[in-house]
Amino acid sequence: MNVVSVYRLCFTVVLLCSWSALGKAKENERPNIIYVMTDDLGYGDLGCYGQKVIRTPNLDRMASEGMRFTDHYAGHTVCRPSRLVLWTGKHVGNTGLMGNRPRSLSGTETTVAKLLQNAGYVCGGVGKWALGHVENPSEIDNPGHPNRNGFDYWHGYMNQSQAHNYYPLHLWENDRQVLLPGNELLDHPQARGRVSSKRETYSHDVMTDAAMQFIRRNHRDPFLLHIHWTVPHANNEGGRVLKDGMEIPSYGGYANRDWPNPEKGFAAMVTRLDADMGRLFKLLKELAIDDNTIVFFTSDNGPHREGNHDHEFFDSNGPLKGYKRSMHDGGIRVPMIVRWPGKVQPGVTTDLPSAFWDYLPTACELAGVAAPDGIDGLSYLPTLLSQQDQPKHRYLYWASQEGETTIGVRKGHWKLVRYRKDRDGRADWRLYDLRNDVGEENDVSEEHPETVLELIDLLKNDDLPLIANRN
């Protein structure tokens, strides 16, 4: 090989290395994305949303360092359909799941995890999955398994009902069961295998540790992490059998309060998850990835009244009407805080009406991925970056097979709710003006019949259900 050839070879190698380094640098500019979803946390359960009793200092600080959404909505009033909306970017009118009946992903759906995985993100998750019914190791090929739907790693519950128990015999780590030492199930007909007689290993702590370990393993490359905590959901069976479904290792600072034990447990759950948010932010700073990591925090639906906990004890729905399973805002409007140092302005709020189906296109835009066609979501990244070109929804839509209300629609400041039972022989549609009635106390449908008809016509034109029948 002559000198010229050697020179050309060296130049080519240097150029290829430069291109590789440039590509790696651009890849590393893509932010890490962490999405934290609690279970049944109400709009009024955090200090930054008006809570006066339960302590949430880390989430309050997150709000002061980021953006707080005042008009953000879950995908549904209950767990499973709300999560399906989040994964697919489609509201329930297009997912077809309008209640908590069993539903497993088929493995063919386009999920936010698949989209980012294909773009080079390492995708992990912990907590409640709810969309793949896996009972035992022989069912690990179930197409609803998170590993078949974009997640490289998953540690948590596969079966939604088993997630009621905070002291289960095992959790799943990908396709294997991981036994939790010291837990034994209660032999009681009403326990249904979801109440433990011996309690040593708290599932929330195991899943939280798994999330921290995932970050440590993958912090050098862009990653997507979903943390789907089960707190502060009740153990419903535990509430029936033991009269206290708010399972927690310790009541902490609430132990000496003159409250019923379920209320001590609920408050301790919320403060515990808040402390874990503090752990999360401390880890991001320790690994020097805080500035390149965007963190979302929200809840899957409104507050519950289960496990002998009363949502009114701490005013969990704040100024809103209704709670879990209601089409009123107390059942679907949820806290949402987003923090991204240097990108999201600190201490700001937005009243942008947005919903879970907007997360998929937002995550795609953050990752530099084209959002798929046929979704209902709109990226709210412009709002996060304080830009003026934020696209707006014509309206937001929900339908439910559970509870006394069946349809919810929001268009601008108008909120339309349909009750399941007819009124005076006609469909019972009730209209509220959220500008001056955030609590939805005053039905103004008779004063504004044209608005009611306009909103119903929007649904008819888009071929959306006007009622969601019970299963």
Image: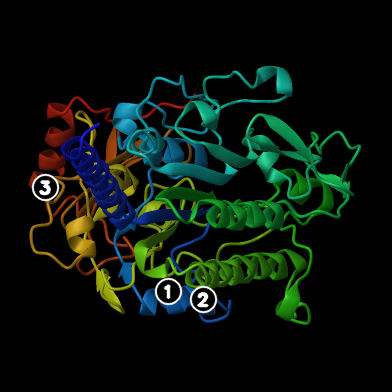
Instruction: Say if 286 sits above or below 404 in the image.
Output: below
The mark closer to the camera, 3 or 1, is 1
Q: On the rendered structure, is 110 left or right of 281?
A: left
Work out whether residue 84 can be spotted. Answer: yes
Q: Secondary structure at mark 2?
A: helix
Residue 90 lies in quadrant: top left
Percent from the top left, x then y, of residue 20?
A: 29, 45
User: Cβ–Cβ below 8 Å for labels 2 and 1?
Assistant: yes
Point out which mark residue 290 bears: none
Percent from the top left, x then y, of residue 208?
A: 63, 56
Quadrant for the N terminus in the image = top left
Q: Residue visible at 29% across and 57% down?
A: 29
Q: Amino acid at mark 1?
A: Met
Percent from the top left, x then y, of residue 166?
A: 73, 50
Percent from the top left, x then y, of residue 159?
A: 64, 33
Residue at which label 1 appears:
62
Q: Residues within 10 Å of mark 1 (few under 14, many from 20)?
A: many
| Nearer-N-terminus badge (3/1) | 1
Q: Secondary structure at mark 1?
A: helix
Describe the colour scheme in one phrase.
rainbow
Residue at which label 2 appears:
58
Residue at which label 3 appears:
451
Q: Amino acid at mark 3?
A: Thr
Distance of label 2 from label 1 (alpha carbons): 6 Å
Q: Residue visible at 73% across and 54% down?
A: 245
User: Cβ–Cβ below 8 Å for labels 3 and 1?
Assistant: no
Q: Amino acid at mark 2?
A: Asn
Residue 338 lies in quadrant: bottom left
The mark closer to the camera, 3 or 2, is 2
Q: On the rendered structure, is 145 left or right of 238?
A: left
Q: Nearer the viewer, residue 165 or 115?
A: 115
